[in-house]
Structure formats: structure tokens, C-alpha cells
Amino acid sequence: MTSLPAEPAPPEHSRAGDRPRKLNATSYVVLGMLCHGPATSYDLKQRIAYTIGNFWAFAHSQIYDEPVRLVADGLVTETVEEGGRRKRTYSITRTGRQALQDWLATPTHEQTEVRDLGVLKLFFASFGERADLLQLARDRHESHRARADSYLEMHERIIDFADPWQVKTLELGLRYERTVEQFWADFLAELEGPRVPSSDT
């Protein structure tokens, strides 16, 4: 039986007696992506862009900085290329996999956060012009329709070989986009329909 290589000891600041750094969503995204195999920061950025990036926004700096922090935490190892650009490749450790599993096992009661610029503008639309509200409805309807169409196309491409739970996230995204697309379509129909004059009281 082949034994696994020993993992490096955690750095002094993360050993027992010291408070370990609290991991955030980006930490777990990196750990999860590394479960698919070793990757450079650029590889991670590409993997995220085509998958999680469809429903979770990341600053590029986070993707480049977080693996370094995870190395310091003892959850990830790095291999530096000799010569050339000295490219750094990251791999998840057994401790890192356990941290990801522990996170997956925690209850998830947090409410969903929606940061939709269209909804924000709609909230304040009373202070703008009607023509701008019409344009907003048209823009958002088209935007959500296009995103839903792209999800459907992606679903058809990957359904036969992709991870089934990752496919489920895509199906949820598709349902969400179609629902919001229909909301803006209905709202646009209201705006473009006959306006009922207000009655005097």
C-alpha cells in the first residue's frame, strides 16, 4: 500500500492555543475548486468564471490572494515552478478537505442576498422620468432573457457529463432568470398598456 506524503505542520499562528483565521465564502470556494485538482491562481479564476461566477461575484484580487492565506493556514500547499515565471500551483491538503466538509455540514439558515441594480432603480423610480422606467423594464427583461438562454444552452452542453449537483445549481439559476424575465415582461406590458386616468374624489 502506498502511503500518502506527510503534510507540512500548520504555521505557528494556527496551532492549538491560537485562534485560527475565520474562513469566508471565498476560502471555501478555493478549497472546493482545488478538490477538482491542483491549480494556479489563473486556473482558479478560469474555473470560477465558467461556474460559480455565474451566481457569485468575486474580485480578481480575492482569487489571487486567498490561496496564499490558505497555505499559511495549512489547508493548501503550493509548488513553485523552477525558472521561467516561477508559477505557483496550489493543492488542497487533507486538513483543507476536512475544513470544506465541516463547512458543508453546517446549517444554512441565512437569507438569500439579492443585489440587483434593476430592482434598486425600480425602488426609486418615482423620482425619475416615465421614459426611463420604460427603458429600465426593457433593459432588465432583455438582460434576464439573455442570461436564461445562455444557461439553457450551457445545460444542454454539460448535462451528460457534469457533476449532478453542479447541474442542479445551473437549473436553479435558469428557473430564477426565467421567473425574473417574466416579471419584467409583465411589468413592461403594464407600462405600455392603456393608462387608466385617476378619478377625482
Image (cartoon, rainbow, N blue to C red):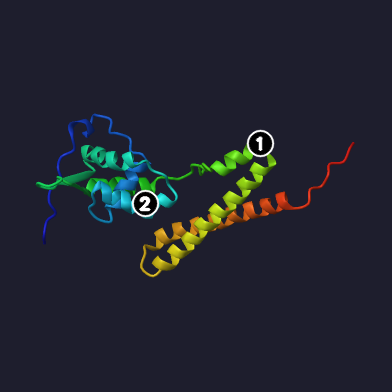
Q: Quadrant of the N terminus?
A: bottom left
User: Between 76 and 99, which is closer to the camera in this rendering?
Assistant: 76
Q: Quadrant of the C terminus?
A: top right
Residue at the extreme right of the image, as rendered? 201
Question: In the rendered view, would you say 144 is above or below 75?
Answer: below
Question: In the rendered view, would you say 73 is above or below 79?
Answer: above
Instruction: Identify the secondary structure beneath mark 1.
Output: loop
Q: Which mark is residue 49?
A: 2
User: Image quadrant of residue 15?
Assistant: top left
Q: Position of residue 199 (x, y in %)?
A: 87, 41
Residue corresponding to mark 1 = 128
Q: Is residue 106 left or right of residue 94?
A: right
Amino acid type of the residue tagged 2 in the rendering: Ala
Q: Position of residue 116 (x, y in %)?
A: 53, 43
Q: Position of residue 87 (x, y in %)?
A: 17, 46
Residue at 23% x, 39% y is 68
Residue at 26% x, 42% y is 67
Give the mark, 2 or 1, whose residue is nearer the N terminus. Answer: 2
Q: Sort mark 2 into few (<14), some (14-19) or many (20+) by Cα contacts within 10 Å.
A: some
